[in-house]
Image (cartoon, rainbow, N blue to C red):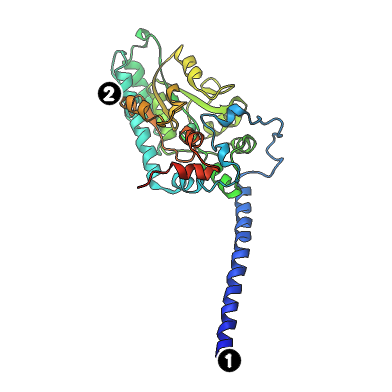
Amino acid sequence: MKKLIIVTLLIMVASCATVKQTTQPAEKRSARAARSHAVLPPEGQSGQTGSEAKAVTAEDSSSVEARSHPALAAAEDQDHLILATLWFQKSAEMRALFYQCFRNAGIALKENLASSGRTGTVADVSLPEPGTFNEESLGDNKRAASGNLQRTELPKPAAVVIDIDETLLDNSPFQGWQVLEKKSFNNDDWFRWVELARARPLPGAVEFTRYADSLGVEVFYVSNRTVQEMGPTIENMAAWGFVNADSTHMLLKETTSSKVERRALIEKDYEILLLVGDNLADHSGIYEKRGPDHGFAAVDADRRLFGTRYIVLPNPMYGNWLNDLLRAAPGITGREKLVNMLESF
Ligand SMILES: [Mg+2]
């Protein structure tokens, strides 16, 4: 009898465990669906039809800013993004790094301005405190800069070139949505997110653009958002107070992901003193194709430019670094390719 009771209890425990295993994912799926609808509108409410949204092209799939490589699409599994996205959203280290990078960007810009053959000095201008806008002090900076620099002697006015996504605007909710929905990147979903104009500014980003403007440096945005995404991008950035959030200063993607030509266009009339971005292709064309050494030799050769002319922000979620890994690595699935690239001992 005692044995029978024990066996019955064991069967009940096993049954409960089985029920828990089969019902929990359904509950999680339902919670995911509820959360995802809070981020993106239901199909058909974006105001843009699928045919109007830009089509996925072969060029897009190897875009310098492609957010997920096609090799990872087969399993419809975006779990590789979980830790990277959580780090971006939840780590204090990420916030500290952004503040650090933008503060370094301000210092470098001021130094480059002072040492770029321009007369006068900008020594009396100061960086704003993160998270605060002191309109009065920024105005003083501008007056000081314009008063000290004799611009008539300059061959070209100074400019700073800044990327937008994961440099100024935080699109990690879109990455989170991809994980929860197990969806690889596609342009229709991306456009729906952009059209919401709901991306938040990254730490220190708004302040840096306003600081650059206060120095009299022209702020340009060079991004691989497409020209069709100009309207909501301007709306999104203007709402947070980014300077020059207009079509004159925003050079978006028309036909090619390479930013070389757009930078050259700016350089016709301006001297670019600083480039800021989360992808090395935001800084130079030599990083667009990296080769078997992942671009390490090129970075080593340019090491003196980092922190002085190039400011690089951290993005573990996507970028050329990941695209190149997946292109080069052996393996059947995207996950296998990534695992095969791991260094171990
Ligand atoms: Mg970017």
Q: Residue at x 59, y 35 (%)?
A: 194
Q: Secondary structure at mark 1?
A: loop
x then y, percent, for residue 65: 52, 31
Q: What amino acid does circle 2 point to?
A: Ala
Q: What amino acid does circle 1 point to?
A: Met
Q: Quadrant of residue 44?
A: top right
Tell me if I can see residue 275 in this picture: yes
Q: Quadrant of residue 121?
A: top left
Q: Quadrant of the N terminus?
A: bottom right
**For residue 37, side relative to residue 216 (left or right):** right
Neighbor class of circle 1 (other Cα within 10 Å; few <14, some 14-19, many 20+) is: few
x then y, percent, for residue 117: 30, 13
Tell me if I can see residue 129 in this picture: no
Write down the residue under mark 1.
Answer: 1
Write down the residue under mark 2.
Answer: 123
Neighbor class of circle 2 (other Cα within 10 Å; few <14, some 14-19, many 20+) is: few
- Point out the frontmost of discs 2 and 1: 1
Near-viewer residue (257 or 158): 257
Q: Secondary structure at mark 2?
A: loop
Q: Which mark is residue 273?
A: none
Q: Residue at x 43, y 31 (%)?
A: 292
**For residue 235, side relative to residue 49 (left or right):** left
x then y, percent, for residue 217: 40, 20
Number of marks: 2
x then y, percent, for residue 180: 58, 49
Q: Are marks 2 and 1 in contact (CB under 8 Å)?
A: no
